Image (cartoon, rainbow, N blue to C red):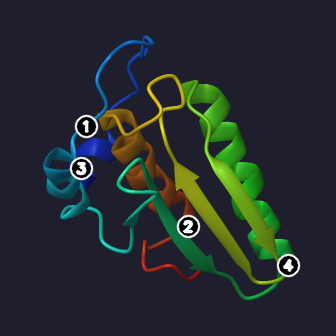
Amino acid sequence: MLNELSTRKCTPCQGGMPALDRSEAERYLSQAPGWSLADNGSRIERHYSFRDYRSALRFVVDLSQLAEDEGHHPDISFGWGHATVSWQTKKIKGLHENDFIMAAKTDQIAGDGNGSA
């Protein structure tokens, strides 16, 4: 499912839609190695390690460009050799399929998806 998701585009999300319930989120999560549910299942998060600051910054810049292209934006924190990415559909204050699409694409940007680049 994750590889399939990485080929898809985000769909516009309108406020008022229901967020994925925990069992739906866990079903997607089972196909997203390295990602974890956070904030009672209302967002997903992953930590990545990099060899230096420049590599972490390059990842953040590349992910920012993808977010602009897709119209779906993560919360990102980063520093020397690391970055943490969190996805949530803010209009519904929870998870949507788009978040898992973007998780798959985030892993592609990071490299082989194992959290190291």
Task: Identify residue type, mark 2.
Answer: Ala
Q: Earlier in the sequence, mark 4 or mark 3?
A: 3
Find the distance from the CA under tag 3 to the CA under tag 1.
6 Å
Q: Nearer the viewer, mark 2 or mark 3?
A: 3
Find disc 1 in the rendering and name its residue: 20
The residue wearing badge 2 is 110
46 sits to left or right of 36:
right
Task: Give the distance between the C-alpha atoms of the residues marked 1 and 4, in whole angstroms.
Answer: 35 Å
Q: Could you tell me if the residues under marks 3 and 1 are in contact, i.e. CB atoms within 8 Å?
A: yes
The quarter of the picture where residue 4 lies is: top left
Counting from the top left corner in percent of width and height, residue 45 is at 49, 62
Question: Which residue is label 3 attached to?
Answer: 25
Left or right of residue 39: residue 77: right
Label 4 to label 3: alpha-carbon separation: 32 Å
User: Residue 40 location, x and y as percent?
Assistant: 38, 56
N-terminal of the two: label 2 or label 3? 3
Q: Residues within 10 Å of mark 1 (few under 14, many from 20)?
A: some
Rendered location of residue 93, percent (x, y): 47, 33
Q: Earlier in the sequence, mark 2 or mark 4?
A: 4
Which residue lies at the image location 73% right of the left edge and 57% below the top edge?
60
Badge 2: few (under 14), some or many (20 or more) residues near its Cα, within 10 Å? Answer: many
Distance between the Cα atoms at labels 2 and 1? Answer: 26 Å
Q: Nearer the viewer, residue 96 or 57?
A: 96
Quadrant that contains the C terminus: bottom right
Give the spatial CA distance, label 2 vs label 4: 14 Å
Q: Is residue 14 above or below residue 78?
A: above
Query: Mark 4 = which residue?
Result: 53
Residue at the location (21% across, 50% down)?
22
Q: Secondary structure at mark 2?
A: helix
Is disc 3 placed on a helix, strand or loop? helix
Which image quadrant for residue 86?
bottom right
Contact between labelled residues 3 and 4, with CB atoms less than 8 Å apart: no
